[in-house]
Every structure is written in structure tokens, then in C-alpha cells.
Amino acid sequence: MSSRIAAALRALAVTLALLAGPAYAHEGHDHGAPPPPVSKTISPRGEALSAAFELVAVTRNGTLQLYLDRFQSGEPVSDATLEIDTPTGPVTAQAAGPGAYRLPAPWLSKPGRYDVMITVTAGSDVDVLPVALTIPDPAATSTAPTGASRPFGAALAQTLPDLTQGIRDRLTKADPVLLVVAGLSFLLGLLVMALVRGRHRLPVIAVVVLTATVLLSTNAFAHGGEDHGDQPVQGAALIPPAASAAGDDTTDLAQRLPNGSVFVPKPTQRLLGLRTVMTEVGTFNRTIGLPGRIIANPEASGVVQSSVGGRLSPPPSGRFPRLGTSVSKGDVLAYVTPPVQRVDLSDMRQTQGQLDQQIATVQRRVERFSKLATSGTVSQVQLDEAQDELKGLKDRRAALDKFRQEPEPLIAPVDGVVAEALAVSGQMAAAGQMIFQIIDPKNLWVEALSFDALGGAESATARLADGRTMQLTYRGAGLADRNQAIPVQFAITSDTSGLRVGQFVTVQAATTTELQGLALPRSAVVRTGNGQDVVYEHTTAERYEARQVRTTPLDGGRVLVAVGIGAGKRVVTQGAELLDQVR
């Protein structure tokens, strides 16, 4: 019984296929290869290049938008004059922002190819740039493409509707009465066969009956004369005609294309601040990286120490200088009052008494000699000796009082800023203890540790953790090792604002070994997720491609590219990190 049912199903399939006939190739349904990908976010555009300029023309909303940049650097060109030869005559574009210009162009609403000549005048630079603009035809983009094969799933999804459509077309052209009689006879035969052989086959027969009923529904008879030319076809470009023709409803978006390149429209390039440089091969000295730290210039810094132990007291201003306070050479920063023990105080008082007694005795002697010297009884020599002895005793007495009453002043040895202050009111300072450190923040040095002799290292740079670089001048190297390394000192010749003593840096010191390659700023090299270094080449006006490179440090701000890209290429040096994030 199962073989008979299978035979009936095969007969039904053959009948449907014969009814369909050439349904797979009926008019208006060409099922070739799908069209190339068309983005709804990119407006029709054209571009032109010269040795000085890079121009992009975009059509949108019935206007022609022009973007003008410098070819080598990618910098927008403002205050330029753009004269365009249009089908309606020469017209001058109006400025619409930095490097952007606008021109009403209603003639671009018609599909077709337009060759436009644009004369650019920017200062002393004058160029004539031809731009080709192609406006697609909405009717052409709505038809399905032909050609290559498609995946089985897509072909099957398209074939089933076509099969049904072919059957309906055949049924429409046939006699309705004959069709009804043939269909009812076929169904009646199947029903009788099921009743004779048993009811357990009814579910299968029900499925067959339901399928035939759907295919032979009354819709097939009412389908004739209907035009399918305006129906959308699967696989065709799903772009509205208005958007395809003039880009009225589109917005250019930066995106990474399937081949890995990055499309970045000119307005987005302005936002990202992209800049490029032309690569050139050069010869450079090999550099080595040294760990270093910032130190104070020994010739422009100093420390303030107490020569004797004592108690600290504020200067005449009443306050100790705090960190960052500017001081001048000779300023009193603090006082140190030496402590006096009780035994020492008793001895001082005894000494003071003895001095006072001697001063009184010598004072009377001087007075007596002064009276006798007028009569010649005492010589002038004796009088002078007595006066000198009196003067010496008084000086000793005054020095003893001064030692007891006056503290030691701590004086600034150089001009600069207080970098370290340890003074607190009432603090006891030991002899030789540093109380203040004074440095000149505009005169700092860098001390690095090298394991090889640098031989002068005339060219050197220092790089901070935040990416800042500083130019250095070689000052000298030590002859004694420090932790198996040679200390090398450099003077900072560039701006030192924001630096602090003890800050760690990386010194790039040049050697006598020469290397050849391309020097690029460090900002041009981007580290990808897999750890590979890449640079972005500006291949066309709005397209960038990543190039894998191998680099070596050249100095604090540049790297040397040995492999990966050649000379004469435009490489992104500003905004490469942002460009790498485009997806």
C-alpha cells in the first residue's frame, strides 16, 4: 500500500512540474548573482588629487559639497577659491566651514555621469582638478542582477514562489470547467483508495489534499492580467530611488570595509583631526634606551643645614618658607638657637664675673695713666697698652653675651624654589642636618645609567610616562660604576614646566652606529589586539589601509620603520588611535 501512495505522490509532483513549465525563467524574474554590496550610508561622490591638493565632491540634497585638503598633510584648506564649470555655466562655491565649500546643483538630480572641472586657487597655489560624478539610476538599481549561482537556501526560497506562480499562470490560461473536473476526479480517486485500504492512511491523504487545494485555490484563477514588473525582487539593491539618485536621505558614516580598509568621509576626518606625513628614507644614528631620573642642577641648587645643634625658630617674617616658595640668595629662612646646659651656664656666669672684674681694674688703670701721661710721668706706650687690654676684655665680654642671646641664622645659598622643607617651630635640629633644599625649576638635569660607554652622546632625548619628550645635552659621565652601570648626566634644554626632582624618565641616547629607514612619530604606530604594530596609509581621499610594520626606537618622539611600508606614502601621524577604533 505504501508503494501505491508513493507512486501517487510522484504523479502529483510530475503533474505540478508540467503545469509549471518554464516557471523558473518566466519574465521579470532573473535569478542570477546578487548585486555587489551597496551601502545606504554613502552618498554619490567623486575625488581628485594633485601634488598640492586633495578634493572630494559629494552630492546631497540637491547641492554639491566640496572638501579641500592639503595632499601631504591632510590639513583643511580654508580661504580658497573654487570655480566649478557646471552644465549651467561657471559658478564659484561658497565657504561652509574649515576646508568645506557648498554649491547649489539642481542639475545633479538627473541620473548619469557628470565630468566637472574645478579650479582651485589658494594663495600662490593654483590647480585644475577634474572630478567625475556618477548619479545612479533608481530604475536600474531596482532590477535583479544575472549571472552566477547562488546558495541552495536562497535558490530554494526563490524557486517555490516561482513554481506556484507558474502553476497559477498555466491554470489561468486553461478552461476553468475542465480544471475543476480534473481536480475533483483526482481527489475523489485518492479518497476512494483510502477508504478501501483503511483509515490509517487518512493523515497522509489529508496532507496531499490540503496541498493541492492551496495550489488550485481560487486565487490562481484571479491572478491573470496582473503586472509583476513593479514588485521587489529578492537580492536586488534595497535602496530607495531618491536616496540612490541624489543621496537626499543618506548620512556618510565611517566604516571598516570587508577588505579591511577603513572608509572615513571628510567631515569625520575633520572631527578625528587626522593628519598625515609623506614618508622618506633617511640615515639615522642608532639609539639605546637608558633608565634615568630627573635631578637638580648641582650648579643651580643648594641645601640649608645647621652648623650646630639647636632649636629652630621662624625667621623675622614669622613663618617658615613652605614647599614651592620662591626665595632669593641671602634670605633668612630660619634660626637655630643652641641649647645651654646648666653646668655650661654656671661656667659662663663665672667667666662673665671674672671679665667684669678685669675690665674694672683695667679701666681704672687707663684713667690713671691718662692723667699721668699729660705730665710725662707715664709714657704714651703704657697708656696705649692699657687701652688695648681694656678693649680686648670688653670684646670677650660682648662675645660671651652674644653667644648666650643670638641664635644662628639659616640663609638661602642660591635663588630658586623650596623643594624640601623640614622646619617645624620648636624642632631640635642636629648639627649637619638638612633643613631646606632649594632648586631652580628652570634648570634641571637628567641622570641615566648606562652599561656601555656612549662616547659623548651629543644627541639625546628623554621621554616621560605621559609621552612628553625633552631635548638633552650631554654633560658628563662617571668613571666609577654605580650598581655595575655608568652614571651619565644630561642637561635639559627644553621646557621644564611640570617636572619634579626624582621623576623617572627613559633616555634615548644616540650612538655612532648608523641605520637606514623611515622616521615616523610614535603617535603613527598603533598596537593592535594581537600585539602587532601597524600604521595607517592614506591610500585615497577617504580610505585608509593598515600596514604591518617593524619598528625600533629612534628618539623620544620618533621610531624607525625598517619593514612594512616604503617611501612616498602618506601615513597617519595624528588620530591613528581613533582611526583604529572604526568598525
Image (cartoon, rainbow, N blue to C red):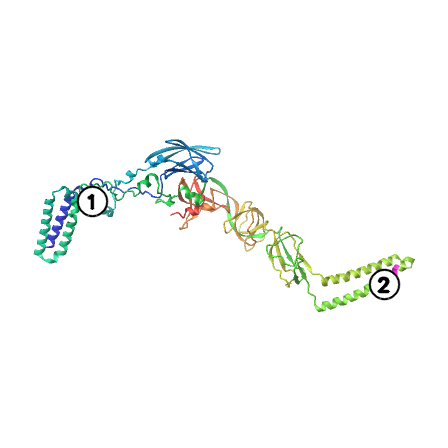
Where's residue 22, x and y in %?
17, 41
Q: Is residue 578 above or below residue 116?
A: below
With 69 as the anchor, is 15 left or right in this view? left
Picture quadrant of residue 252? top left
Q: Nearer the viewer, residue 148 or 23?
A: 23
Q: Amino acid at mark 1?
A: Asp
Q: Main secondary structure of the magenta part?
A: helix
Where's residue 290, x and y in %?
52, 50
Q: Give the class, few, some or many, for how many residues have Cα within 10 Å of label 1's Cα (few <14, many ≥20).
A: some
Q: Amino acid at mark 2?
A: Arg
Q: Earlier in the sequence, mark 2 or mark 1?
A: 1
Q: Which residues are magenta?
A: 363-370
Q: Nearer the viewer, residue 21 or 569?
A: 21
Q: Residue furthest top?
A: 89
Q: Is residue 409 above or below residue 21?
A: below
Residue 206 visible: yes
Query: Considering the image in quadrants, where does the N terminus appear?
Result: bottom left
Where's residue 116, x and y in %?
38, 33
With 65 as the anchor, is 408 left or right in this view? right
Question: Is 167 within the magenta?
Answer: no
Q: Give the class, few, some or many, for how many residues have Cα within 10 Å of label 2's Cα (few <14, many ≥20).
A: few
User: Which type of secondary structure does the marked residue at label 2 adopt?
Assistant: helix
Residue 278 visible: no
- Mark 2–mark 1 Cα distance, whole angstroms, equals 145 Å
With 448 as the anchor, is 81 left or right in this view? left
- The residue wearing badge 2 is 364
User: Which type of secondary structure does the marked residue at label 1 adopt?
Assistant: helix
- The residue wearing badge 1 is 162
Where's residue 547, x and y in %?
40, 44
Q: Is residue 91 above or below residue 252?
A: above
